[in-house]
Image: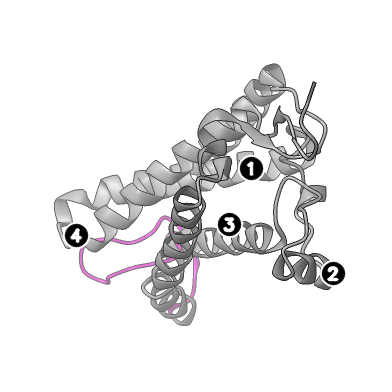
Amino acid sequence: MAERGYVPAVRVWDGPLRLWHWTFAVCIGGSLFTGLSGDLELTQWHMRSGYTVLALLAFRLGWLLWGGLHARWSTFRVTPARVRAFVRGLPVTGPRTAPGAALALALLLAVAVQAVAGLFTSDFIFTEGPLVRHAEDATVDFMSSLHHRVFWVILALIALHVTAQTVYGVRRDPTALSMFTGWKRITVPATQHYWLRALLTAGATAVLAWYLLGRL
């Protein structure tokens, strides 16, 4: 017999989402390392990593629409009422807290801005993005300046995310492990994995990326 107040664990994060999450994290780390190292020999790897990040963002956009139950856009609810409920320590009624949803959206937006700006970025000596030749000098200057500043925002958001997960871990809250296991103790319906849907989405994303890169 279940204890009063006991909440059983359910599968909240589907397999494709978790695979995407860790691939995205590795690519972001790789982009930051190759971009900040100052080693010109790593420039091509930096650009490849940036292209991969753009493809992953495209996949996530699709997964927001037809992905796992709790990976969809409808779960990113950041309302004053939900923020107040979180601050007051009330039970979470969805797969994400309001601050968690806001942080995830902010990180996705910052990475998207950084990656797109990189397409128009040039150091005017050795390296330039694939869209530089299609843009005016003022646009290239603006995008280059943006690309060399937005990474600070990304680093700050990553630090905030890691800090939050560390706090969960110190409190022995299983939330910190949920993106590894997929499971959380929360009262929401369980999700399916939708692997076939994920493969079709990834395939469409890869074809789109191949087509666009071939035309740049």
Nearer the viewer's eye, disc 4 or disc 2?
Answer: 2
Q: Position of residue 140 (x, y in %)?
A: 43, 74
Range drawn in magenta: 119-137
- Residue type, label 3: Leu
Query: Is tag 4's residue or tag 3's residue first in the polypeptide sequence?
Result: 4
Q: Position of residue 166 (x, y in %)?
A: 44, 54
In the image, residue 129 lies in the stretch drawn in magenta: yes
**Residues at badges 1 and 4 in contact (C-beta under 8 Å)?**
no
How much space separates mark 4 and mark 3, taking CA atoms?
23 Å
The mark total stands at 4
**Residue of label 2:** 81
| Label 4 CA crowd tier, 10 Å (few <14, some 14–19, many 20+) | few
**Residue 216 in sight in this render:** no
Nearer the viewer's eye, disc 3 or disc 2?
Answer: 2
How much space separates mark 3 and mark 2, taking CA atoms?
23 Å
Disc 1 secondary structure class: helix
Q: Is residue 10 left or right of residue 175?
A: right
- Residue type, label 1: Arg
Q: Is residue 93 above or below residue 122?
A: above
**Residue of label 4:** 37
Q: Is residue 72 left or right of residue 166?
A: right
Q: Is residue 208 left or right of residue 96?
A: left
Query: Is tag 3's residue or tag 1's residue first in the polypeptide sequence?
Result: 1
| Label 2 CA crowd tier, 10 Å (few <14, some 14–19, many 20+) | few
Disc 3 secondary structure class: helix
